[in-house]
Structures are given as C-alpha cells and as structure tokens.
C-alpha cells in the first residue's frame, strides 16, 4: 500500500485517471471495507465483541486519566428462545436486527453499541455518570417495548432486561471485571421479572450529588415499581 502511495505522489502529470490512482483508490476502499468487517457484527450492524473489548479498555483508561466516568449498559432480549421456537430462527435474526436499529436511533453518536454474543448487547457510554447511564438504559427499554417488530406478518412486542454500572476510575478494574459487575445487575433484572433496569442502589445516592432538580426528577420518574 505504501509503495502505491509513493507512486501516486511521484506521478509526474498528477493524472487523476492514471491506472495507478485507480488502483490506490480501489485498495483504500477495500482496506476500509475489511476494517469495518473486523469491527462490525454483520447481522445487527452494531460493533462486535472484538471492538467492544478494545474500546472499553480505551474508555476505562480515559476515565483513569480524566476522572470522567464511563457508563456501561448490558442488556439481554427477554425470552429469545420463545421467539425462535414460535417464529423460527430467521425471525429471531430479524428481531436482533430490529434491536440494532433501535439502539442506533436512541443512542448518542459517541456511544458504542456492541453485540456481546447471542441476544446479549453492551453499550459503552463515554463520559457518563451512573444516573445518566440509567436514563439511557430506560430510554432503550422503553423504545424497544413500544416498538413491536413484524415477524411472519404479525406484530410481536419485544422487551429486554438491563444492567447498568459506571466506572469512576477510583480503583483499577479490568475490562472483564467491569463487564462482570454490570452483568450482575442484568441477572438481577431478569430475576426480578425482566423488562426492567437494575443497578447498584448504594452507588446512585453518591452519584446523585451535583444533579439538578430536573435531572433528579427525570431519573426517578423512570424507575419501575416492584412486582
């Protein structure tokens, strides 16, 4: 690639239709396509596991340097096996694609939505404290619950369970430990009836410091009653 770029720079006439220029362009496009394939889950269009681990490590290091929290959302589609058994595996794939579409629409451009595996997803929220991460998870939960997907000609209501945590950089965690902590709250959400958001209630008291009255009211307005 570098040799072709050198040839491009040395082209005496700077002819844009020169075959060398065409080859350089083609190779650049191919490299970009291959790079995207190494980062993107082909089914959902979200980032893949490899990109998740690399990016989360980078964001946690940024938190340790700057003190700006990294939020993490872990979600699992509720009763996915039932969808596959009732509608077929192709419809199961369509359901996962639908989630990818909603996640793209409801998250910020800087957020990184990733497919963790199967029907599990992780969203990295740069520079995000726990209260804001909880609100983002509730926004995703609400959007999914109220956006049925058409499977085999029938509208099917999907729901998901969410676990949320935030890394503040006060102690050195590995990526795996951070994910495991967040997964704990996801398991809690599933145990408490699914289609809900769970997080560390003790952390939220500390994290609430500094929030405006409107932010506090918005946060507690999203909390679901016990069943």
Image: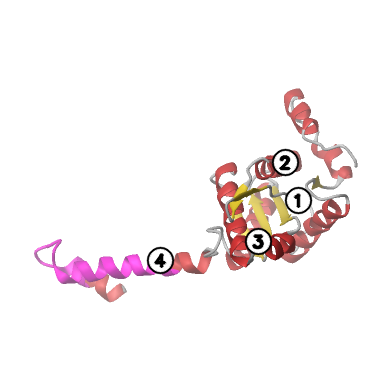
Query: In the structure shown, which secondary structural element does the residue marked by tag 2 occupy?
Result: helix
Query: How far from the left and from the top, in percent, is residue 4?
Result: 25, 73
Query: In the structure shown, which secondary structural element does the residue marked by tag 4 occupy?
Result: helix
Residue 219, placed above or below residue 190: above
Query: How far from the left and from the top, in percent, is residue 127?
Result: 65, 45
In this picture, which residue range is highlighted in magenta?
7-34
Q: From the image, give the main secondary structure of the stretch colored magenta.
A: helix
Label 3 crowding class (10 Å Cα cut-off): few <14, some 14-19, many 20+?
A: some
Disc 3/disc 2 C-alpha distance (Å): 27 Å
Residue 38, placed above or below residue 82: below
Q: Which disc is residue 138 wearing?
A: 2
Q: Earlier in the sequence, mark 3 or mark 4?
A: 4
Q: Earlier in the sequence, mark 4 or mark 2?
A: 4
**Which residue is found at the position 86% from the left and 54% from the top?**
188
Q: Which residue is mark 4?
A: 33
Q: Earlier in the sequence, mark 1 or mark 4?
A: 4
Q: Which residue is mark 3?
A: 87
């Amino acid at each position: 690639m570098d040799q072709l770029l050198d040839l491009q720079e040395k082209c005496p006439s700077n002819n844009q239709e020169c075959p060398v220029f065409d080859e350089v362009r083609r190779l650049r496009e191919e490299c970009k396509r291959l790079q995207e394939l190494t980062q993107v889950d082909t089914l959902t269009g979200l980032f893949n596991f490899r990109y998740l681990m690399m990016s989360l490590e980078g964001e946690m290091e940024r938190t340790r340097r700057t003190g700006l929290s990294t939020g993490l959302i872990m979600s699992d589609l509720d009763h996915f096996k039932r969808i596959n058994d009732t509608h077929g595996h192709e419809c199961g794939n369509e359901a996962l694609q639908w989630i990818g579409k909603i996640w793209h629409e409801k998250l910020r451009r800087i957020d990184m939505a990733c497919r963790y595996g199967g029907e599990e997803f992780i969203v990295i929220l740069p520079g995000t404290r726990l209260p804001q991460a909880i609100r983002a998870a509730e926004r995703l939960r609400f959007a999914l619950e109220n956006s049925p997907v058409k499977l085999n000609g029938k509208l099917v209501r999907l729901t998901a369970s969410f676990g949320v945590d935030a890394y503040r950089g006060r102690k050195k965690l590995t990526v795996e430990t951070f994910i495991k902590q967040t997964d704990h709250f996801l398991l809690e959400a599933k145990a408490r009836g699914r289609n809900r958001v769970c997080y560390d209630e003790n952390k939220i008291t500390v994290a609430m410091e500094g929030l405006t009255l409107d932010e506090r009211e918005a946060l507690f307005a999203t909390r679901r009653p016990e069943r």
